[in-house]
Image: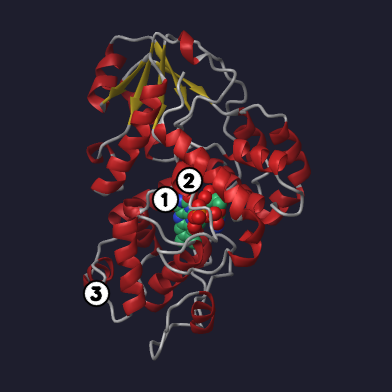
């Protein structure tokens, strides 16, 4: 199997970051110097969220090539991502609730002004343009953006989260939904993130000038509580059926327990907007297609398919193996197929995921307390 362009590019970018910028990451990561200067962060999120690069492989690579102490902050950020994923997987109703609300809350003239980049806040309008043109925002700007959206512009967080999903190349159901909830004060109950003029001016080139931000905002509150519940399946059955299905957010063949060559056929599927509740921009869908094509080139037995093709396949098939596509639209689609067809969907989880998610039962600092166990598991190198 050849390593084709995207995967090589992703690894090249990771190696370059490790060699040149990782050592200053902790000191500089919070600064947003603008789209022309992103050396202080890795800009790997679009590869990581589609799992062209798998979190565990990144951590192992860093640990085996750098001095300890040097890379701790970066690894912590990757662990944040694993934590958010684990939290959503173990509190799945949060996703259902968010989707329903995002679809039912009506937009209004202020929302339309915001998403067109026509607010009174020029630097906010600039972020809107960056989202649409670069399909990326720096982490600190995402925090300021979400805070201003919710507390200064007084727009519903759900519509902001849906807008991010539409335009970000790294749009991720867990990191995005839960970060928006965190800014709103719903994730860490009673603690919201307030964007302050002084903080924005310190960490970016932006001059806030005479714009008044709501710096005394209270956290949002919600009546609903979400209990922790681990996914029921604890054991995988590998290579059960002759066909494997891979969605756009698990675009790798690094699970050593799956024999990818043994499949008669491997279907690669990206849901088009007809099958989604949250509409993605044309650029985001095209970006996903580029990544998918790369995997297609690596796998001789793969076939890029459309949803109607899979639905026809289900009419006459006993079962299909599926690399678990996480809580989100892809898994919702699988669940819809399950109600309409008798085909079995044999879900294959990444074992490191299942191991880590069980620690996402409380806040991040509790998850961090179990770092030693988590790092031990990761260092076994299951996914090298
Ligand atoms: C409101 C809001 C929405 C967000 N939506 C997304 C999203 O849809 N998809 C997404 O991947 N990230 C999201 N993030 C997290 C974070 O902003 C991005 O992962 C990060 O900015 C990506 O840039 P980078 O790759 O240069 O990050 P780096 O700083 O280089 O970090 C390396 C990697 O660590 C992970 N990471 C870093 N910071 C975070 C974080 N705060 N939470 C979770 N993982 C993190 C990412 O995988 C990232 O690629 C969101 C944050 C906020 C505040």
Name the spot of residue 380 as percent of width and height, x first: 72, 29
Q: Residue at x 65, y 47 (%)?
A: 361
Image coordinates for residue 39, horizontal then vertical, percent = 51, 59
Can residue 84 be seen at all in this image of the molecule?
A: no
* Residue 137 position (above or below residue 1): below
Front residue of 234 and 101: 234
Residue position for label 3: 118
Q: Quadrant of the C terminus?
A: top right
Q: Secondary structure at mark 2?
A: helix
Q: Which residue is mark 1?
A: 97
Spatial CA distance of label 2 from label 3 is 34 Å
Q: Which mark is residue 326?
A: none
| For residue 346, side relative to residue 153 (left or right) | right
The residue carrying pointer 3 sits among few (fewer than 14), some (14 to 19) or many (20 or more) residues within 10 Å by Cα, namely some
Q: Which is more foreground, mark 2 or mark 3?
A: 3
The answer to which of marks 2 and 3 sits earlier in the sequence is 2
Marks 1/2: CA–CA distance: 6 Å
- The secondary element bearing badge 1 is classed as helix
Residue at mark 2: 93
Please say if 335 is above or below 95.
above
Instruction: Give the image quarter of residue 272.
Output: top left
């Amino acid at each position: 199997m050849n390593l084709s362009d995207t995967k090589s590019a992703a690894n090249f970018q990771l190696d370059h970051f490790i060699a040149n910028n990782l050592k200053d990451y902790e000191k500089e990561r919070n600064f947003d110097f603008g789209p022309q200067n992103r050396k202080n962060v890795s800009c790997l999120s679009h590869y990581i969220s589609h799992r062209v690069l798998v979190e565990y492989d990144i951590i192992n690579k860093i640990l085996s090539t750098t001095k300890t102490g040097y890379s701790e902050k970066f690894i912590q950020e990757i662990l944040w991502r694993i934590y958010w994923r684990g939290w959503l997987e173990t509190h799945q109703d949060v996703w259902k609730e968010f989707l329903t609300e995002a679809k039912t809350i009506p937009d209004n003239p202020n929302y339309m002004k915001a998403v067109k980049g026509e607010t009174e806040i020029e630097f906010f309008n600039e972020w809107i343009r960056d989202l649409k043109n670069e399909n990326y925002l720096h982490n600190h700007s995402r925090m300021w953006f979400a805070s201003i959206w919710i507390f200064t512009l007084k727009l519903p967080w759900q519509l902001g989260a849906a807008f991010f999903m539409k335009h970000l190349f790294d749009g991720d159901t867990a990191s995005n939904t839960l970060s928006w909830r965190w800014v709103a004060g719903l994730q860490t109950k009673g603690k919201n993130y307030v964007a302050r003029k002084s903080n924005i001016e310190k960490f970016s080139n932006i001059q806030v000038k005479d714009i008044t931000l709501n710096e005394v905002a209270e956290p949002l509150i919600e009546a609903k509580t979400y209990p922790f519940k681990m996914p029921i399946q604890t054991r995988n059955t590998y290579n059960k059926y002759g066909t494997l299905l891979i969605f756009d957010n698990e675009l790798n063949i690094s699970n050593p327990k799956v024999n990818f060559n043994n499949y008669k056929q491997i279907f690669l599927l990206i849901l088009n907007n007809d099958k989604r509740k949250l509409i993605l921009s044309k650029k985001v869908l095209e970006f996903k297609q580029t990544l998918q094509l790369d995997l297609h080139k690596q796998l001789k037995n793969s076939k890029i398919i459309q949803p109607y093709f899979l639905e026809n396949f289900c009419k006459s098939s006993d079962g299909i193996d599926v690399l678990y596509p996480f809580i989100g639209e892809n898994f919702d689609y699988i669940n819809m197929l399950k109600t309409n067809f008798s085909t079995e969907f044999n879900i294959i989880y990444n074992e490191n995921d299942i191991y880590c998610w069980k620690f996402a039962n409380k806040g991040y600092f509790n998850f961090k307390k179990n770092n030693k166990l988590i790092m031990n598991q990761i260092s076994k190198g299951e996914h090298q």
